[in-house]
Amino acid sequence: MRLSGRRRKSIAFFITLGACLVAAAVALNVGWILLNWREVALLVLGIVFFVAIIAGLVLNTIFLVREIRRNEQHDAFINAVTHELKTPLASIRLYLETLKTREVGEAKRGEFYDIMLADSDRLLHTVEQVLRAGQQGSQKRKRATEPLVDLSEVARDSLELARTRYPQLAADALQYSKQFDNGGRSIVRGDADELRAVFSNLLDNAIKYSPDEVRVSIEVAALDQKRLAVRVTDQGIGIPPRQLKRIFKRFYRVPGRVVARVKGTGLGLFIVESIVKKHGGRAFAESAGEGQGSTFTIYLPRAEEK
């Protein structure tokens, strides 16, 4: 909280400083013009320098504010990743120490093993997220040489993985549907593992940000002859309209108390958009507002089956 307050004070300081410098420059320039209105050449030169000074001050202030906000996002990311790594490690250590120092029944021992495996999966998921985010700056691959992938199968696999990760969910909490005319297939060219990561991230977010009863659906449909659409819809906390375009930025998390209670690295949606763009597609979010749920849509180019 103290660090955040200092950052806000720094932002306010630079904004105030920039405003004061702009006001001083305007006052000096206007005064100079009034005193030297007959000197046309100097007047033009003064206006040029005045515009350059104002532009420099504005750009400098914008740059400083952006750097402060970027550093704040980096700090939040480091804190989130540290928590995501430390918590399961501490849990695994605790259960291992218990198994080593105490006599535990077979049923309890199996329960401990299940918990440790779940914590290991959580660790692996966090590491994969960080590594995958670092790989998204690579150049686009040639899609024509990539293998064919059935998007419906990838979506179903991701749904089953989500059921495994969240065994407490009701049987009908996660729904899958496919909308195709004439029995068409959902074939694209790409990397099945990367596409699976896209759906897993979207489903994971939909579940985590559904504080009450979880109702999440994933739909694969033919948008037209050249594109496929995948929609992940939830009945969760929703997204303010002004945040819909910002949520795909690296490290960005929507501000708010409800979101703050859900742990995350701010990388999931950045990875989603990066992978979708790499596959020649487009990703975007829709929401009627806070408390109204969200729909994340992905468009991908269809591949011709030989």
Image (cartoon, rainbow, N blue to C red):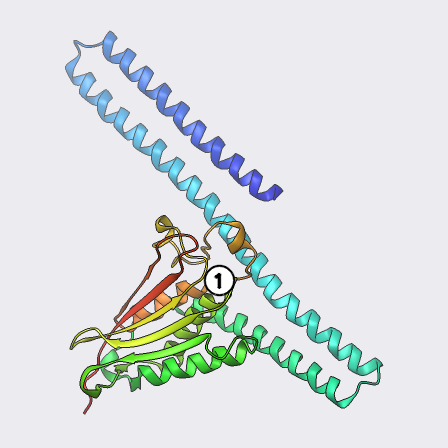
Which residue occupies the extreme bottom position in the image?
Answer: 306
Which residue is painted at 18% across and 86% down in the image? 182
In this rendered view, identify the residue nearer to me: 145 or 298.
298
* Helix, strand or loop at mark 1: loop
In this rendered view, identify the residue nearer to me: 98 or 17.
98
In this rendered view, identify the residue nearer to me: 39 or 224.
224
Q: Position of residue 265 (x, y in %)?
A: 51, 61
Looking at the picture, does residue 145 appear above or below residue 15?
below
Q: Is residue 139 visible?
A: no
95 displayed left or right of 71: right
Looking at the picture, does residue 257 appear above or below residue 13?
below
Residue placed under numbered mark 1 in the picture = 209
Q: Is residue 297 visible?
A: yes
Mark 1, other Cα within 10 Å: few <14 / some 14–19 / many ≥20: many
Q: Position of residue 235 (x, y in %)?
A: 42, 63
- Image quadrant assignment for residue 46: top left
Q: Position of residue 180 (x, y in %)?
A: 23, 81
Quarter of the image with the C terminus is bottom left
80 displayed left or right of 226: right
Which residue is painted at 27% across and 24% down in the image? 50
Quarter of the image with the N terminus is top right
Q: Position of residue 96 (x, y in %)?
A: 75, 79
Q: In the rendered structure, which amino acid carries the disc numbered 1?
A: Tyr
